[in-house]
Image (tube, rainbow, N blue to C red):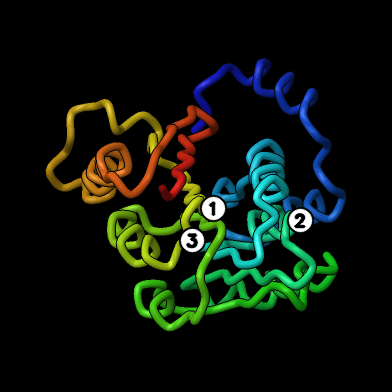
């Protein structure tokens, strides 16, 4: 998932903001107890999410794909005093672990959890968003974009993870690979859709920042 040498990645992290202790604990528990711990945003990307959120200072954030809550906690660091973060995940088995760390963080009352299909949940959330983070099933990325674009405030940001998909986006496409095909369509849409301006960054597995015009 990383596109720079591990030694250079270590240097990058060492010269970026330190990872909060609570997120270190969450990382450790995720690796000990949860399947696919590489899905964590991790130290470097977490600090990037935190900094972007602090720059936006959002009153309303949407996250599609909670996993164990690392990225939600990173994004919550920039919330305005009365801000809310809505986070959605399919896996109900992770709900209690997420809530444990949300409450320990001090942002517990500002983070609203949803369990289920984001395609059904997003339209039911009565809010306009300043910031959206998409990190869920890749085949649904184009659909998620259409679900959120009209709920995003002008000037609001969409952050999209895994958009390089371990480099598969530049390899010969397997017709059976629905995820890579969807990401190719999604990346092209973000580039060409006149409603947003987009920069794709080679951070970890690919990280896109899109701003609504």
Residue lying at 64% horizontally and 77% vertically, measured from the top left: 112
Which one is nearer the viewer's eye here, 213 or 65? 213
Q: Nearer the viewer, mark 3 or mark 2?
A: 3
Q: Residues within 10 Å of mark 3 (few under 14, many from 20)?
A: some
Whichever of callouts 3 and 2 sits on the residue coming sooner in the sequence is: 2
Q: Residues within 10 Å of mark 2 (few under 14, many from 20)?
A: some
Q: Is residue 191 above or below residue 8?
A: below
The answer to whether 14 appears left or right of 90 in the picture is right
Name the residue tied to disc 3.
Answer: 153
Q: Position of residue 12 (x, y in %)?
A: 71, 22
Contact? badges 2 and 1 (CB < 8 Å): no
Q: CA distance from mark 2 to mark 1?
A: 25 Å
Q: Is residue 198 above or below residue 138?
A: above
Q: Residues within 10 Å of mark 1 (few under 14, many from 20)?
A: few
Which one is nearer the viewer's eye here, 43 or 52? 52
Q: Nearer the viewer, mark 3 or mark 1?
A: 3
**Element on which disc 1 rests:** loop
């Amino acid at each position: 998932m990383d596109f720079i040498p591990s030694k250079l990645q270590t240097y990058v992290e060492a010269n970026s903001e330190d990872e909060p202790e609570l997120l270190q604990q969450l990382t450790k528990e995720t690796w000990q107890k949860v399947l696919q711990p590489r899905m964590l945003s991790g130290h470097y990307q977490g600090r990037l999410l935190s900094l972007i959120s602090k720059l936006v200072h959002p009153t309303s954030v949407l996250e599609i794909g909670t996993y164990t809550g690392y990225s939600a906690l990173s994004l919550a660091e920039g919330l305005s005093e009365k801000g809310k973060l809505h986070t959605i995940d399919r896996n109900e088995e992770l709900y209690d672990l997420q809530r444990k760390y949300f409450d320990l963080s001090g942002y517990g009352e500002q983070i609203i959890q949803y369990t289920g299909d984001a395609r059904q949940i997003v339209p039911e959330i009565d809010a306009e968003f300043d910031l959206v983070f998409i990190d869920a099933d890749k085949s649904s990325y184009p659909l998620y974009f259409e679900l959120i674009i009209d709920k995003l405030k002008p000037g609001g940001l969409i952050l999209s993870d895994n958009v390089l998909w371990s480099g598969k986006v530049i390899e010969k496409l397997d017709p059976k690979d629905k995820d890579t095909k969807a990401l190719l369509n999604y990346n092209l849409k973000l580039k060409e859709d006149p409603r947003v301006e987009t920069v794709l960054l080679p951070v970890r597995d690919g990280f896109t920042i899109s701003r609504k015009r």
